[in-house]
Amino acid sequence: MRRGKSTTSLPAVDERHLRNRQMLFLLIAPSVAAAFFITLVPVLLLVRMSLSSVSRFGRIGDNVGLRNFARLMADPLLPDIALRTALWTGSVVGGTLLIALPTALVLNRRFFGRRLAQFLVLAPWAISVTSMAVVWRRALSDEAGLLNRLAMASGLIERPVIWLGSIPASFAFEILIAILVSVPFSTVILLAGLSSIPSEISDAARLDGANAGARLGHVTLPLLRPFICVVLIFNIAYVMNSFPIIWILTQGGPANGTDILVTYLYKLAFTLGRLDEAAALSILMLGALGVLTVLMLRMLERPAHG
Amino acid sequence: MVKRSLLSWGALLPLLALNLFPFAVVLDTIHRRGSGGDVATFWIGMWHRTEIGAALINSLGIAVSTALVSTLVALPAAYALSRWRFRGRRAASQALLGSQILAPIMLVLGLSQMVAWAGLTDTRLALIGLYSTFQIPFAIWMLRGYIDAIPVELEEAARIDGASRLQILGLIVLPLSLPAIAVTATFAFITAFNEFVLALTILRSPSNFTLPIRVNALTAGRYAVDWPDVMAAVMVASLPVMITFVWLQRYMLRGLRLSLGST
């Protein structure tokens, strides 16, 4: 897939080789420095805070060893929140793929108004997640609003419902919104994958007598595999760290019933002022994410067959 | 073809309905506003009541700066990753993809301490710095895909004709990468324009608020929310990105496609 193999493989005179190295360093240094700065400094600060007692105003006090981690582990809310984060990530990422894949398959074929359809599928991309969440909050809390009128007109409910009043309904809607927000980007990546599959392969399979289902299962999906992996990586990263939807709709409430790890982290740090425990939670989450990332990159490495 | 078109539209219908629902809610809420005169009075009043104008200027300033800074820093690195063979190059490519998972929210506590130490709490400058840096990996990833697609033969021909490295960069690589630069900058613009968590944490004074924070402040922790105003503010907040999107959608999609091809 890559071109451009020869710049430095030309037989290089030592001096030019050296100049080349210096140039390489100059080109890359600013990005590398910035990346190190933005990750290493906050991580070191977090490590230090997680091992100290920190006042609610951010003053770092004595070293307390692992006390913050122990307190965190004793937090009765945490197991539920961790489980809910897994549920949230699993259902949003799974739901997104389940919707984006068929959508991309449909959009990949020619039909009347395909460009308009594609534009409408991608439309939520143009609106910030914040705005989307605010609009849905209005829809879900408005007794005389569009959602209640539509639901009543279609006979789903008899009286207006304040959807954000109940935990399961709130969380279900938050999952739905997160899926809707993630579908456009995922569809685009899958479309890119589909357009990279030469139509000859599918034609050959058809000539060999494979029906549509077999072509999808044995030709299209295996070839799409690397793109599905990219969708999974981007979405898992994005969804686990997705903050605005839940924060704006319910702030993790009622009674921490819709909190996921990142909203609880934010609450610990900036609402409850338990900065040291929040730092400890950040460290634990970073560790877990690191492991997850390595696993996912491995997945991407593995070839499609074998 | 007609049958297939109907089937395709039918299959997409549920998703399209869900996508259009928020737009319908916005229009419905504004339409059902109780008192408050004609359309012009409402919009002018909304503009003053919500202070959305200042937020719009803040957001535009921060987003444009982020687009410039992140693209300028990422461009040389992307070129190097595309053209040089060096040890650790593969690892660097993986790190680019892997770093996507490191979201600001994980680090937000450390970042806010860092910003406080630098004396930049409650400044727009802090946000520009943070957004630009977080955007760099994605920008490198995007630009590299594009630069990979520029044939090296062009550069080699120029070198044989006696062009210096700088000349090659300035006269061949740069002009050919302009579309890529535009697309990368657009993505950075949109990301910065819509960012929520860092802005929520770092900005304190309402005069510094960006659009997402302003919109959030209009609803969060209030007993009586003026929803028609909020919905109109949401429209204002969405307009710049919507215009960009309608205008550049084709190029953005092509850019993503190229970058994916070289992953």
Image (spheres, coloured by chain):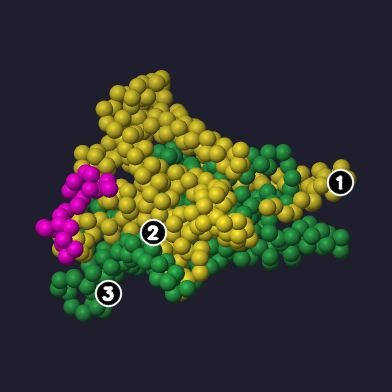
**Parent chain of label 1:** A
Colour yellow maps to chain:
A
Q: Secondary structure at mark 2?
A: loop
Alpha-carbon neighbours of circle 2 within 10 Å: few (<14), some, or many (≥20)? many
Residues behind callouts 3 and 1 on a single chain: no
| Measured Cα–Cα span from mark 2 to mark 1 | 50 Å
Residue wearing tag 2:
A128
Q: Give percent across and percent down for residue B242.
A: 42, 67
Which badge, 2 or 1, comes first in the chain's sequence? 1
Q: Residue at x 72, y 54 (%)?
A: A3
Q: Nearer the viewer, mark 3 or mark 1?
A: 1
Residues behind callouts 2 and 1 on a single chain: yes
Q: Secondary structure at mark 1?
A: loop
Q: Nearer the viewer, mark 2 or mark 3?
A: 2
Q: Give percent across and percent down for residue A109.
A: 51, 65
Can residue B10 be seen? yes
Q: Which mark is residue B44?
A: 3
Residues behind callouts 2 and 3 on a single chain: no
Q: Residue at x 59, y 43 (%)?
A: A304
Of residues A208 and B98, the one nearer the viewer is A208
Q: Which mark is residue A12?
A: 1
Q: Secondary structure at mark 3?
A: helix
Can residue A123 be seen? no
Relative to B197, B218 lies left or right = left
Q: Is residue A256 above or below residue A27?
A: above
Of residues B182 and B54, the one nearer the viewer is B182
Q: Give percent across and percent down for residue B75.
A: 64, 55
Q: Give percent across and percent down for residue B163.
A: 83, 62
Q: Amino acid at mark 3?
A: Ile
The segment highlighted magenta reads A152-172
